[in-house]
Amino acid sequence: MMGSKRDEIIQVVLDLTVEKGFDNLSYKDISDIIGIKKASIHYHFPYKVDLGLAICVHMESLYDELIQKIAKESSYQKKMQLYIMFYDPANMDNTAPYFSLLSSYNTSSVLMQEKLTQICDKEYSLLYEILKLGVESNSITISQSLDIQTITILSAIKGAYKYHRIMKFDYVRKVYEYFSSELKI
């Protein structure tokens, strides 16, 4: 059974955000794909910012699910494995729209910027705490501060997605494999 029209619009927006970038998608693009009038889209999402916020809500719910799964685990290895698997290239459909939306941060509304900042804070805090557990349990040794290591990993993951989109080479898989080895998972 197909979901609601609103859910269908959100899915198309997620796909178009990856394909074209959020700034470049239009209500016409969405209506052409779904086969509905632009007014129907405006009914559910009166402003383009509402479409961006829907992506943010979608991404935040994915992170909340991840946080819950990780909280159930006690070992560093299990927690890090779940974290890294979240960014596995097989899950790109879930995370790539968010990464594309981050590229539009400076041109986004204040409301979207606030939501993106909240998600980034969650993402950072989650990884930081996992790495901290790894260091404290002597599961890993890092040569930099936890802050720098966290930022390095997040930047590498996001950068790999961008290169993947441009170069059509599986940079995401290479970064995933590298961190899987380096982080001993």
Image (cartoon, rainbow, N blue to C red):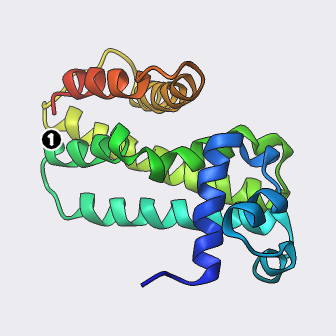
Query: Could you say which is closer to the camera, residue 162 or residue 80?
Result: 162
Sort mark 1 into few (<14), some (14-19) or many (20+) by Cα contacts within 10 Å.
Answer: some
Percent from the top left, x then y, of residue 152? 46, 24
Q: Residue at x 23, y 28 (%)?
A: 180
- Quadrant in the picture for the N terminus: bottom left
Q: Position of residue 89 (x, y in %)?
A: 36, 38
- Across and down, in percent, residue 119 comes to 57, 55
Give the residue at mark 1.
77
Decide which of 138, 115 is in the foreground and name it: 115
The image quadrant where one finds the C terminus is top left
80 to 139, vertically: above or below: below
Query: Which residue is found at the position 68% from the left and 61% from the top?
Result: 33
Count of numbered tags: 1
Q: Secondary structure at mark 1?
A: helix
Q: Quadrant of residue 52?
A: bottom right
> What residue appears at the point 60 percent right and 56 percent down from the top-left corner?
14
Whether residue 42 sits left or right of residue 154 in the image: it is: right
Of residues 83 and 133, the one drawn nearer to the viewer in this rendering: 83
Residue drawn at 82 percent across, 50 percent down: 108
Identify whether 156 is placed above or below 27. above
Q: Is residue 19 left or right of residue 84?
A: right
Q: Quadrant of residue 150?
A: top left
Q: What amino acid is labelled 1 in the image?
A: Gln
**Residue 136 position in % (x across, y down):** 20, 37
Residue nearest the viewer, comparing 11 with 148:
11
Q: Quadrant of residue 7?
A: bottom right
